[in-house]
């Protein structure tokens, strides 16, 4: 089940809510965990992505990748 981040417009608290995709798409809105206000908006957060370090974001054939030469 996805986690959505929200920010309260009344007290400025930030909190996470686990909600089904169906409930979210139907417009379900949580209430603030701190003050109980229903005046909340969806907050956007960044996501950390860890890669193997072997990709440069460029396409390459497998033989060239092994030698570290990208096309």
Image (cartoon, rainbow, N blue to C red):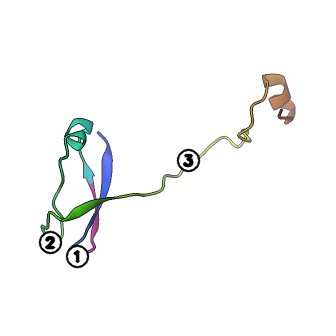
Q: Is 33 located above or below residue 48 in the figure?
A: below
Instruction: Measure the alpha-carbon separation of dots 2 and 1.
Output: 7 Å
Q: Is 3 located above or below residue 31 in the figure?
A: above
Look at the image and give the residue range highlighted in magenta: 11-16
Quarter assignment of residue 36: bottom left
Q: Secondary structure at mark 2?
A: loop
Q: Residue at x 24, y 40 (%)?
A: 25
| Residue located beneath label 3 in the image | 49
State the mark number for residue 11. 1
Q: Which percent across, then down, holds residue 16? A: 29, 57
- Is disc 2 surrounded by few (<14), some (14 to 19) or many (20+) residues within 10 Å? few
Of the residues tagged 2 and 3, which is closer to the observer?
Answer: 2
State the mark number for residue 35. 2
Instruction: Measure the alpha-carbon separation of dots 3 and 1.
Output: 31 Å
Q: Residue at x 80, y 31 (%)?
A: 65
Instruction: Measure the alpha-carbon separation of dots 2 and 3.
Output: 33 Å
State the mark number for residue 34. none
């Amino acid at each position: 089940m996805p986690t959505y981040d929200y920010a309260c417009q009344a007290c400025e608290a930030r909190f996470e809510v686990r909600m089904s995709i169906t409930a979210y798409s139907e417009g379900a809105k949580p209430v603030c965990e701190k003050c109980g206000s229903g005046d909340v908006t969806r907050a956007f957060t960044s996501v950390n992505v860890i890669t193997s370090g072997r990709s440069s974001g460029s396409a390459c054939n497998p033989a060239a990748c092994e030698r570290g030469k990208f096309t």
